[in-house]
Amino acid sequence: GAVVSQHPSRVICKSGTSVKIECRSLDFQATTMFWYRQFPKKSLMLMATSNEGSKATYEQGVEKDKFLINHASLTLSTLTVTSAHPEDSSFYICSAPIGGSSYNSPLHFGNGTRLTVT
Amino acid sequence: QKEVEQDPGPLSVPEGAIVSLNCTYSNSAFQYFMWYRQYSRKGPELLMYTYSSGNKEDGRFTAQVDKSSKYISLFIRDSQPSDSATYLCAMILTDKLIFGTGTRLQVFP
């Protein structure tokens, strides 16, 4: 069964509004979670690393003020897309390492959230 | 040159065929090697992962790593229509997971 749960699976919002996506680790604690973005027929691009109890680490070119990440507990990380625009429409996927805390560990992925901004 | 190269396909095979999916990489510092399967509109599902050179088998799947050639493969035996998906290789370099572009596989009855 799924070990990483992501919600919602699909969301449609109007331009200018904000959307929050939740990522939960099931039956294990994750001090680190990762957020990816995937465009159609493209591979996954790492956006940011979510760290429990501290600030997220963003990849080059990712606007931290637009993509707010909060890792408030050992089982929950959230990604908020603020003031969304149509170009933010994409498939967002979270993941957590198998070991829960190790960077050098294979990742389990959630089922993704398809965001459409109209 | 990309860090991880993977033929995007599509690869179309008949049911029951043996499928070979491959990736090459450029950095010998890569550590864990993984294969993920991704169905349309779903997140990637971890199929197999290994650390060392050699073969690792799990049911119909065999993962092969050749560190000297910087080459990894995934073999699928007795392929089924339900195996139709995109297969992504991935490798870990220090704290980052680097993905290949994915190979789209279609198994027809």
Image: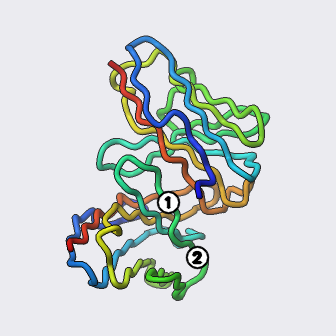
Residue at image point 56% right, 25% down = A20
Badge 1 sits on which subunit?
A: B
**Mark 1 element type:** strand
Whether B86 is drawn above or below A53: the answer is: below
How many labels sit on residues?
Answer: 2
Seen from the viewer's position, the closer of residues A90 and B99 is A90
**Mark 2 element type:** strand
Residue at image point 50% right, 17% down = A18
What residue type is disc 1 on?
Glu
Residue under circle 2?
A: B50
Which residue is most to the top? A16
Query: Residue B45's mark?
Result: 1
Label 2 – label 1 distance at C-alpha: 15 Å
Sooner in the amino-acid sequence: mark 2 or mark 1? 1
Q: Where is residue A102 in the image (x, y as percent from the top left)?
A: 72, 57
- Residue A39, by quadrant, is top left
Badge 2 sits on which subunit?
A: B
What residue type is disc 2 on?
Thr
Q: Position of residue A57 (x, y in %)?
A: 64, 37
